[in-house]
Image: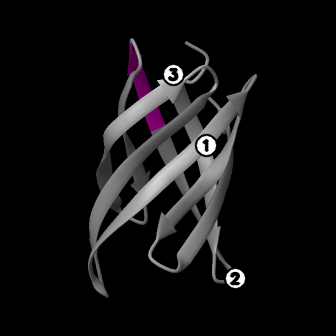
């Protein structure tokens, strides 16, 4: 599948950029994987794939408490991009397949 792979990504939110790695696995229309950034690893949950687009959720303990975020994105060739949304906070991410 076009979505499956490991990507070096940068997440940008509130004027800050955080580098990380996004690893995605596809089985049928189901998406699994993990995100590694800022010394943490979180699993992709409830992931779905539709062609080159994907959705899912991630949860993490943060200094502001336990947070859940929805994730949506797409892949074009070796480039990935998308958005994380947790309540009113939105963060964009971009990256390339490694």
Label 2 CA crowd tier, 10 Å (few <14, some 14–19, many 20+): few
**Could you tell me which quadrant the N terminus lies in?**
top right
Give coordinates of residue 71: x percent, y percent.
Answer: 49, 51
Label 1: which residue? 73
Residue 54 forms part of the magenta stretch: no
- Which of 9 and 76 lies nearest the eye of the viewer? 76
Over which residues does the magenta segment extend?
23-27
- Which of 31 and 63 lies nearest the eye of the viewer? 31
Of badges 2 and 1, nearer the viewer stands: 1
Q: Residue furthest bottom?
A: 64
Q: Residue at x 31, y 53 (%)?
A: 41
- Which of 35 and 59 lies nearest the eye of the viewer? 59
Using the image, determine if residue 32 lies above or below residue 38: above
CA distance for labels 2 and 1: 20 Å
> For the stretch drawn in magenta, what is the main secondary structure?
strand
Q: Residue at x 60, y 67 (%)?
A: 91
Label 3 CA crowd tier, 10 Å (few <14, some 14–19, many 20+): some
* 2 or 3: tag closer to the N-terminus: 3
2 and 1 marks in contact (CB < 8 Å) = no
Q: Which mark is residue 4?
A: 3
Give coordinates of residue 38: x percent, y percent.
Answer: 42, 66
Label 2: which residue? 15
Of badges 1 and 3, nearer the viewer stands: 1
Residue 86 found in image quarter: bottom left
Using the image, determine if residue 90 lies above or below residue 53: below
């Amino acid at each position: 599948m076009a979505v499956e792979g490991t990507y070096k990504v940068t997440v940008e939110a509130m004027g800050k950029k955080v580098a990380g790695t996004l690893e995605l696995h596809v089985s049928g229309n189901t998406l699994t994987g993990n995100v590694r950034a800022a010394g943490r690893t979180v699993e992709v949950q409830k992931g779905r794939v539709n062609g080159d687009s994907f959705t899912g959720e991630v949860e993490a303990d943060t200094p502001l408490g336990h947070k859940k975020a929805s994730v949506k994105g797409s892949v074009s060739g070796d480039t990935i991009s998308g958005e994380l949304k947790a309540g009113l906070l939105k963060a964009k991410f971009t990256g390339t397949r490694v």
